[in-house]
Image (spheres, rainbow, N blue to C red):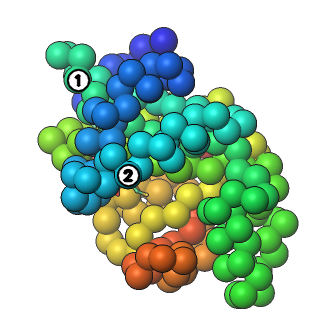
Amino acid sequence: MTAAPSPSCDRVVELTTDQLRARLPEALRIYVTAMGYPPVTAQQRAPMWSAHMLRAGWRCIGAFNEDDELTGIGYGYLGAPGQWWHEQVRRGLQDTGGDPDAWLEDYFELTELHVHPSAQGAGLGEEILRRLLDGAPGDKVLLSTPEGPTRAWKLYQRVGFEDVLRNYSFTGDPRPFAVLGRPLPLNA
Ligand SMILES: CC(C)(COP(=O)(O)OP(=O)(O)OC[C@H]1O[C@@H](n2cnc3c(N)ncnc32)[C@H](O)[C@@H]1OP(=O)(O)O)[C@@H](O)C(=O)NCCC(=O)NCCS
């Protein structure tokens, strides 16, 4: 693991699959707390997060406070045909007359990015995002986020994400989502 200073003074490091596995309950607690989901969602999501770790190009960044408690987590991997999210976005682009191939080839899917509410608002999310994308595979990054004036939305606008799909309905989720993307590397 390599440490780097963050605006919040938390330690921001890359995590291996073994390191995230050892911290998985803690990481999932941050996820449900940040997203406002019921605690049971953490157990439901654990197999999916574990399966994601095995995907090509998987990369994870964690943030730790001075007591070595996890305060933030972000991960992603190379998107590929057959994956649920990839096929959902392809359907959306086809339905809206977009060009799926322009976005859905050689991209890094930013799958999760969460900062514990007690650590939000100090630049930590942006630090994790930048570290995650610095060295991520793919020539572009794609993500989905609920529509609305959220802190996540502000963050993605600030680092130059553009609209890929707006007010999109993923199967099984009633909330409208935006799919956002931008070329990699971030600072090009
Ligand atoms: C989205 C999320 C990861 C962003 O993380 P964050 O640490 O809260 O946000 P950022 O890194 O963008 O920091 C932004 C804030 O830090 C402040 N900030 C930035 N740099 C700073 C610095 N060097 N020192 C102090 N504060 C700083 C900014 O002024 C900004 O404040 P504001 O939002 O009150 O205007 C986090 O809010 C979160 O987990 N949200 C819920 C889950 C979620 O929506 N995840 C994304 C799903 S797609």
> Element at badge 2?
helix
Badge 2 density bin: few <14, some 14–19, many ≥20, Cα 10 Å: few
> Which residue does the image show at 38% across and 52% down from the upper left?
44
Q: Where is residue 62? Give x, y as percent.
A: 40, 28
Q: Identify the disc placed on residue 69.
A: 1
Residue type at the position of mark 2: Gln
**On the picture, is 129 further left or further right than 122?**
right
The quarter of the image holding the C terminus is top right
Question: Contact, CB < 8 Å: mark 2 with mark 1?
Answer: no
Q: Nearer the viewer, residue 186 or 57?
A: 57
Badge 1 density bin: few <14, some 14–19, many ≥20, Cα 10 Å: few
Image-quadrant location for residue 173: bottom left
**On the picture, is 126 further left or further right than 188?**
left
- Disc nearest the viewer among 2 and 1: 2
**On the picture, is 34 further left or further right than 143?**
left
Which residue position holds label 2?
44
Q: Where is residue 33? Give x, y as percent.
A: 22, 50
From the viewer's perspective, is residue 140 above or below residue 1? Answer: below
Q: CA distance from mark 2 to mark 1?
A: 22 Å
Mark 1 lies within 8 Å of ligand 1 (Cβ measured): no
Image-quadrant location for residue 58: top right
From the viewer's perspective, is residue 176 above or below residue 83? Answer: below
Q: Earlier in the sequence, mark 2 or mark 1?
A: 2
From the viewer's perspective, is residue 145 above or below residue 123? Answer: below
Residue type at the position of mark 1: Glu
> Which residue does the image show at 23% across and 23% down from the upper left?
69
Q: Where is residue 126? Give x, y as percent.
A: 40, 42
> Which residue does the image show at 17% across and 16% down from the upper left?
67
Q: Where is residue 102? Give x, y as percent.
A: 82, 65
Q: Nearer the viewer, residue 98 or 86?
A: 86
Q: Identify the disc placed on residue 156.
A: none
> Which residue does the image show at 27% across and 42% down from the upper left?
30
